[in-house]
Amino acid sequence: MSTKTKSAFVCNDCGADYKKWQGQCTECGVWNSLSEVRLGPTPANRSAKFEGYAGGAAGNKIQTLAEISLNDVPRFSSGAGEFDRVLGGGFVPGSVVLIGGNPGAGKSTLLLQTLCNLARTMPALYITGEESLQQVAMRAQRLGLPTDQLQMLSETSVEGICTIAQQTAPKVMVIDSIQVMHMEDISSAPGSVSQVRESAAYLTRFAKQTGTVLILVGHVTKDGSLAGPKVLEHMIDCSILLEGDNDSRFRTLRGNKNRFGAVNELGVFAMTEQGMREVNNPSAIFLQRAEDASSGSVVMVMWEGTRPLLIEIQALVDDSHLGNPRRVAVGMDQNRLAMLLAVLHRHGGIMVGDQDVFVNVVGGVKVMETSADLAVLLAIVSSFRDRILPQDLIVFGEVGLSGEIRPVPSGHERLREAAKHGFKRAIVPFANAPREKNLGIEVVAVKNLQEALNAL
């Protein structure tokens, strides 16, 4: 007697499930995001040792937090300091890391370098489902990597991968990529919502039970977010995005989720003929300014995870020949740019409503915090008035809707980083003014936007 196959409809964005299809997800409001998931019967021969999800069997006793030993989960380094920074200090045994990025960003190259180096000291397994073993070997040879220790496997069956991994017992395992993996008891095609979700859940159970570091490579959609169901990001321990334009040699590794460290950490790599090389001092790279100073340029200090980072912000204000002047922001939120221009008009007395305004963050870095508000406005005013700002000037601060300059976190550390790179003057919020006078930098503390404009 055949068992009737049940199905559900799951939202690709938020993971909400419904009994029948509908045009809009009522949880997140996205249209046409529901996909059918076939709920196949659980096979009776599935190994009982993988029934637990987070590393413990169902019959484990209850323990207090004080009784749980932490000595058996030491971190170990990936071999790259920038990668370790984003991970929170290195790999944690039993953790699941999801790495996404645009095609050609360097995901496979970075992971192949990492595993070839780790294979010298511990068993490592690289599983490729998209490329052949010959293609991976050719890349390793071209990059000059040690190839005598890393174990390779070309497989897309999740059950087969876990069976082989049980025999070889790797400490680190890479799945490239999760979108091509499939399970035998799921009837839908690889890459579907049900296949990605169930494959990731099965591999995660295996990693937690065996203490294996599991690294999943994920595809991204056209808007840069990770493809597949949103529950995939809830399952894993660390979510990392490798960003970078094809015409730029620099790649940024940004942590969006990390259960073992700070989020929004930023690691910088340079793509070379020998593969990905870490950049230990990214501020020096992003501050390669033109020899001839020009208007519309200013340097700010943003805080990325646990360290300050100096970047250059450029602005261009030009007469518009359109009915609706353009507002273009590269590297920051365009809606925030429109809000800052309104504040500049209302509380700064400068109207650029008939001007095209372009703002660019140099180096391909994305500014995720509000400390860039004051720097953006001063760069716009510099371009609008065609007035060159001093090359040794540093600016940071959040701008409120009433024109006040709000403080930002870690202001003292930002000033120290600026002084270390030779900056002599700073315009900062009044609450971030340092008490000590021996920083080697002249600090101008401002309370509102008008005071900041007068300080130029």
Image (cartoon, helix red, strand yellow):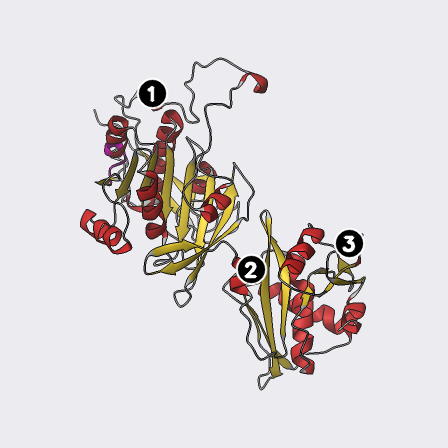
Q: Which residue is mark 3?
A: 434
Q: Nearer the viewer, mark 1 or mark 3?
A: 3
- In the picture, the quarter occupied by the C terminus is bottom right
Q: Position of residue 185 (x, y in %)?
A: 26, 33
Q: Which residues make up the magenta segment?
A: 156-160
- Circles 1 and 3, Cβ within 8 Å, touching? The answer is no
State whether residue 58 is above or below residue 210: above
**What is the distance, in whole Å, between disc 2 and disc 1 at their CAs?**
49 Å
Indicate whether residue 410 is drawn in magenta: no
State whether residue 242 is above or below residue 186: below
Q: Which residue is mark 2?
A: 283
Residue type highlighted by circle 3 = Pro
Nearer-the-camera pick, 81 or 420? 420
N-terminal of the pair, mark 3 or mark 2, is 2
State whether residue 379 is above or below residue 278: below
Check disc 1: other Cα within 10 Å, few if <14, some if 14-19, many if 20+: some
Q: Nearer the viewer, mark 2 or mark 1?
A: 2
Q: Position of residue 93 (x, y in %)?
A: 42, 31
State whether residue 116 is above or below residue 327: above
User: Is 187 positioned to the left or the right of 268 in the image?
Assistant: left
Q: Secondary structure at mark 2?
A: helix
Q: Secondary structure at mark 1?
A: helix
Q: Position of residue 371 (x, y in %)?
A: 66, 58
Check disc 3: other Cα within 10 Å, few if <14, some if 14-19, many if 20+: some
Residue 91's disc number: none
